[in-house]
Each structure stands twice: as structure tokens, then as C-alpha cells.
Image: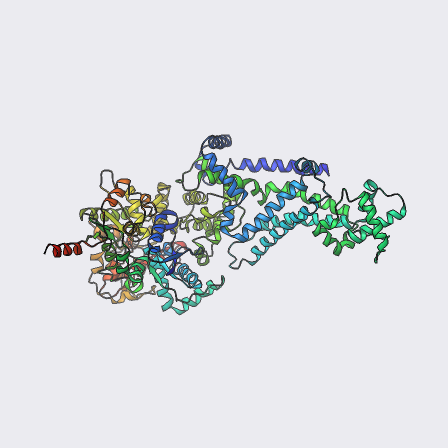
Amino acid sequence: MKLAFFQGCNIPIRIEQYATSLEAVLSKFGVSLVEIKEFTCCGYPIRNVDEKSYILPSVRNIALAEAEGLDILVACNCCFASLQKAKHMMERLPSLKAEVNEILDKEGLVYHGTAQIKHFLTVLHEDVGIEQIKKVLVNRYTELNLSVIQGCHILRPREVTTFDDSFVPKITDNLVQVTGARSLDWQGKLECCGAALSGINNELSAALLNEKVDRAIEAGAEYLTPVCAYCYLQFDTAQANMRASGQQSIPVLLYSQLLGLVLGIDEKQLGIELNSTINSRHISHLKSILGPPVEEKKKRKKKAKTTA
Amino acid sequence: MKLILALAFIIFLVGLVIRGKSWFSGGVGSQTIDTSIIQRFSLALKSVFGTLFSSKVINALTTFLTDIVLQKRLFQKSIGRWTAHMLIFTGFLLLLVTHGLGEGVSNALFSDYYATLQPYLSLRNVFALMVLVGLGIAIYRRVSDKPKRVQSYTSDWLAIGFVGAIIITGILLESSKISSYSYYQGMVEEYGDVSDEQEALALETYWASEHGLISENVTKPYNQELVEEGRAVSENSCIECHSPTSGAFVSFSLAKVIGPLVSKGDKFLYVVHLLTCFGFLAWLPFSKMFHIVSVPVSLLINGVRGFKQPVEASEASLNRQMIGLSACTHCGSCSELCSSLMFYESFQNDFILPSEKVQLLKKVAEGETIPTDTKEHLQKGLYICTSCDRCSTICPSGINLRELFITARYSLLAEGKPETALLSHFSFPLALAQNFVDDHLKALKKVEEQFKKLFQKLSDLSKLTISRPGGLDNTSFQSCYTCQRCTNICPVVRLYDDPQETLGMLPHQIIFSLGVGKTELAAGSQMIWSCSTCYLCQEHCPNKVELTDIFYSLKNSAIKKIDTGGDK
């Protein structure tokens, strides 16, 4: 399976380990990622200013992938939502589609709407499948409690994103469970990381972030796992700036890094040490809780059988 | 001629000093730093020596090899462009050492050097052809650039034209020397060992037949016997110091075609060729061609320092900024892959493209006065940037565009008009990097004040009148039945003890006010700018009111109102 990897603006310069870890993980399942140099920003940052300017870049990005005959893989929720929103609008507003295609025509591009936009979680969950992941596992976490931060723009509005059940999402939890880790039920799971307000209303942005960090720690999470570039930057980079001294903080592990370790990929290749909230102690802890790739319950059943 | 050369050389040197001086004075944001040209120069010297005597010197050497000699950055950008530049660069450089710097230099470099002997005769043509092919690719690229986003200025065409003129006049000069009778005569008189007129005629016939000479004394068809006799004479007295002119294959072929036209113009063309070269020398420091000096410097700094350090206003950053600005060749590489490319399409603001920003920032840095509306465009262009740093990563000249743009952004915001683009997510990476934190907050304050001036608050109203709803494409607000679920689920509302005090209006109140035709009131509420866009309200609304989408529309129209000065 070959997909165009839409990295957006944050991943290549601020979260390189997100791209490398994801590429390493997906290659284990025969999914190869293609770089399209001409991809631009998804348009998300301009949305407060002008809706049409928000749509245009995503339509062009989809058209670029279509020209290569590829579907798009996204690793950032906001990019994902922008691309899906563009598709949604193009389907509903033929006049806008014609207008945008006229602009694209200047560089010989056409938007057809044939390319699919896939969050990498969908690729792992649907295209690869949990069973396939299980087969490839080299390890499994024996004892690990995680708070997944699902993020907003991957789930809502459901008519646009069409990712998962927006009220009771299960894809991410299933993917966490397959690694042996436990995805905790916690209060901030489906809520906002505060990124959208950062630089516009810093206090509010920090309040939203701190609230999530506190709740995750209260719930007993050892790590926090985002599935979005913005959430990651909030929890990993901004967390250090925003937590008052003496306040406890929580280390952040990307889902691709979490999965990578149980697939037997080296932590250096996964770039875990590049996460600013992670230190060598965390890495040795993570490695120390790796066990054989068999589910606990089955083991117990087997034991029960043998003793009987 | 020598006098003109001396003059050109003096202008060249003065130009170098002037341009070099500009590296250590001025700069965008220099007003806030108290320093002198001497301080900045000595700082630069200190860092050069600091680098020379540290392990960083390895970085500098690698950069010299990969980025300057092999031009790796250009190669990564585009093989076509690299080919064009390499052809011009190496072709011109080789022409310079084998020909351009004069016989003295060439003799010192190559012990067997003789301008009329092989391989130098052919090499000159090879090198000239390299430059011409390179220029051809460069012209084609500028003309065929379809989206026409990056503009080509006179300065760009002038640089191509000047280099082309040197090469073309050189080739013409050589063609005319090949065909010129008077030049031939001069050579025969000086070097030829011709005993009688018969031999002279034979030699002339041979040179006309084989080496492109145009002579009135001999005409086609040539007497073959004379040709053979001439060949013998030539072998005795010419060939030792003059390889066959066909070796200069470009000029030789050209002479065959245009020989009759240029055969009498060798002296004139000599003057034209030399004047073009001297003119180029004098013009170089004041033009885009100065990049042959500034780009290697800029690349070396980039090789040693990179561009990822935190941005701060300092003397060192000003020096680097000025060197960088002088190193921009306006090649447009940055703009072709700019993440904000499509925003340029929707706003039609040239200054969204990095290459165009730099052109104007050069003037700003030199302290030139810029018209207010151009400056406002520049400010907006500087802000509509995703901070993806692709331009800095890609710049073939190694300019630290990230630092330049961030510094310029806050320098302009401090004096400019309130910038509504601050209210976009372009602010996110800026807040994350925590550069210019105070300046950012000050600039935000300015926009807030503009809001207060232009919009009424709910609490300002003594009574609420009802009018027809309007001004919004999204009419889903009409199905609201004020159950207040949106407000109850809002994670922002939840954070405040007295949310209405801070937020002005709560989500359900905004929807309600739209229903009674108070779109302006809704657009002016703090709530829409405090919305985290988490979409929880919209998702949970039992009547499918698209609250978050409506908030986005309100934000768009509020910004439009401020940008148009309240007319909308």
C-alpha cells in the first residue's frame, strides 16, 4: 500500500520523530509513504480570518495527491479535518469547486475528489487491522496506564470528519490495547488541548492544557498519548512552559512511538528521546515493562488448562 | 583601456567596501539595539576567529565543499536549476582563470599556456558554451514559470543580460579575429616567416580555405595547389604557436556564417568586449551579482550556526540578517515551496511569498521610507506565515529567513496598524517558541482595542430590539430552542466562575442574538475569540445548530469589519 504522506507544517520542523516513527511503524505492515514536495499548509491556521482561504490549500493538496494517483495519510487532526472539510465543501458546492479549479488550472492541477483522506489511525485500524498488528508484535506492554487525548478535529463535526463514533470512539482505544497498554477512561479524553487559543488567548489556552494534564495525572496515567501534531506540541512542548514550578507534569509518548516499541523498533529510530517531556529514565522504564507478545488472559487460560 | 580598467576596478573596490559596510549597519529591528558599526564589525571578526579555532571549523569546511563548491542545496531543490547555475558558475570561473584575468595570470597558473594553442583555444569555447547553455536554461525557467507567482525584476534580467553580453561579445570578437584580414596580416608580419609573395599568397589561400580567413585577394574556389603549398608554409611558421582555428569551434562555425559581417570589426568588438567586462566589474558590487561574495559568506554562517536557535534581537542577528539580505538572489526557490502559497492566491498579497518579502525588507533594513499601504501589506504578508521554516531549510543562499521574518514581524507590528491576522492560528507557533512574548501581547492589545472601538457589547445595550436575522450564510441557528446544552457542555464556559462577565455572551446567547437579528452584537462578543473550536457544542446540539461553524463565520466577518475600518 502506497500513500502520500501529508505532514503539514509542524511535523517536518518541530516533530520530526512523529514522521520517522510513523514511517518505521507503517513499513512493518507494507505501507510505504510518499513525499509530495509541493504540498502546502492545509489551510487551518487562516480559518479564523477567511473561510475560503481555509479551503483552497486543502483542495490543491488533494489535487496534488490525485495527480499522483495516491490517497493521503495524515498524522495531524487539524490537517485531517481541513482536508476532509475541503472534500465536504467541494461535494456540496459545485460553484466553489469550479472557482477553485480555475485557480488550480494555472498550474495544471484539477480537483476531482477521488483521493481518500486517511488518518494514520484509520490506516492501522482498517487497512492493516488489529489481527495483522497482533501477528507482527514482538513485545507487549505488561503494565502501562495511558491517557489518550483523542483531540477534537479528528472526531467533530462527525458529518465532516467521519473518523469514528464521535461520542464513544473506539479506534484509538483498540489500537492502544493491542500494545498491551491500558487506555484509561479519563475526563479530558475527548476534549480540547488548548492549541487553537495559543497566541490568541494564552491564559485560556494554558488553562485548558493544565486542566487536561491534572486530570490525566489524577486518573493514574503514566504517559499521555496524543494522535495530533497540535495536541503533541501543546502537551510536550508547551506543557513545560505552562506548568508552574512544583506542579507535576506528565511525559508524552506519540502513538507511533508506543506501537513502535512493541514492534521491536529501536527507540532511537522512533526518536523517543526527542520528546521534550521524556528522559532516559522514562525510556528504560518503557523497555523494562516489555513482555512477550502474548495476551495475559490467554496465558492464564493455558495455565488453568495445564494445572487441570 | 588600462585607465578604464583601473577606474572600473576602483569602482569595484569602493562598491565592495560600501556593500561590506552595509553588513554591519542598519537592519530590520536595529532601532532597538544600541550599537555602532565598529562594535558590530568587531563582533563579526570575533565570531570568525572563534569559529576558526574551534571544532566548528569542520562544519565550515564541509559547508565550503558541499554547499559552496558543489552547491548541494541547489541540487536538492532542482536538478535543472543546479545544472543551469553550475554551468554558468563553473563556465565563467574557468573562463576567468584561463582567459579573463589576462595572460600574466594564465601563464602563472598553466605553464604551457598560450591563448592560440590547444587545449586553451577549444576550452574557451567549451566554457563559453557552458555559460550560454546555463543562461538559456535560466531564461527558459523565468519565462516558462506558469503560475507566475515569483516576479522577475529588471535586476534579474540585467544580471542574465550582462553575463550573456560578456560571452556573446567574446565569441563575436573571436569570430571576427578569425575572419579579419587586418588581424591576419598583423599576425603574419609579427610571427610569419614568409619569403616571397608567392608564399604569402599560398599561406593566405590556405588560411582562407581552412581557417576561416576572409581575404579579398583569394576567392572561392580555392586553388588546391596553393592550399597545399600554404599548408606547408603554415606548418613551418604558424602551427607551432597557433592551433587550427577550427579548435575554437563555436567562434569558427560562427565566423563561417557571419564572417563577412564582422571581419572588419575586430578592433571595435575588442573595445566592446572589454568595456562590457569592465562595466560588469564596476557594476558587480551594486547588483544582484554581489551574491558571488555574499552567498558564500551566508552559507558559511548557516553551516556553522544553522537557523534553529531561538530568535532574539542582537547584534549578531543583525549582522547575519544584513549579510543574508545581500545574499538573496531572488531565485524564488523559497516561494515555490512556501506553505502559504495558496494564501497568496486568495489574498493576492505579494508579500506572503518569502522571496518578495525579502526584496522589500532589503529596503526597510537600509532605512528607506516605505509608503504606508505597502508597509501594511508587508505586515500582513509577514504574519500570514505558518512558521514551517521551509524557506530557511531550502534557501540555496543559506539565509536565516526564519529569524529575519520573525524580527521584521514584531518590528513592524510595534509601529504598524492593529494586525487582525494575530487572531489566527499563525500565532500558535509563535507562542510556542516564546520569542518576543511582550511584543506579541502588546500587538494583541492593539487589536483588542480596535474591537472595543468598533463593536457594541451586550452590556452596553439598555434594551434588546428585534430585527430580521441576516448577514450569515449558515442559517442553522434558526432551529435553536434555547435548551442551553451548548453552554452547559462548553469547556471554556466551565473554566470561569462568572463566564458571562469574561466572555461577554455565552454560546446559547450568541445563537439567540442571531435569531433576533443582532449579528453585529454576536460578532463583537469575546466568546467567539475564546472558543477553543472543540466542536463539542455543535456535536451535542439536539437541533443541529452548527455553533462552531457559525462562530468561525462571525470571526471572519468581525475581522473583515476591522480590516475595512468598520465599513462592513
**Which is nearer the eye, B178 or B505?**
B178
Is the C terminus of chain B in the top left, top right, bottom left or bottom right quadrant?
Answer: bottom left
Q: Which percent across, then down, holds residue B437?
A: 35, 42
Say if residue B113 shows up in the picture.
yes
Quadrant of the drawing holding the N terminus of chain B: top right
Is B549 left or right of B190, judged from the image as shown? left
- Location of residue A246 in the rendering, given as x and y in whole percent from the top left corner: 22, 38
Q: Image height check: is B97 above or below A104? A: above
The vertical placement of B521 against A266, above or below, is below
Q: Position of residue B313 (x, y in %)?
A: 42, 38
Display colour scheme: rainbow
- Residue A177 x, y percent position in the rendering: 22, 55
Relative depth, front residue between B433 and B119 = B119
Q: Is residue B464 visible?
A: no
Please state the total of marks drawn on the protein image. Answer: 0
In the picture as drawn, the residue positioned furthest to the left comes out as A308
Q: Is residue B77 left or right of residue B267?
A: left
Residue B480, quarter of picture: bottom left
Height in image: B284 above or below B219? above
- Residue under the image location 70 percent in, 51 percent down: B249
Q: Horizontal placement of B352 versus A264: left or right?
A: right
- State the residue at coordinates (35%, 41%): B438
For residue B143, what is the image quadrant? bottom right
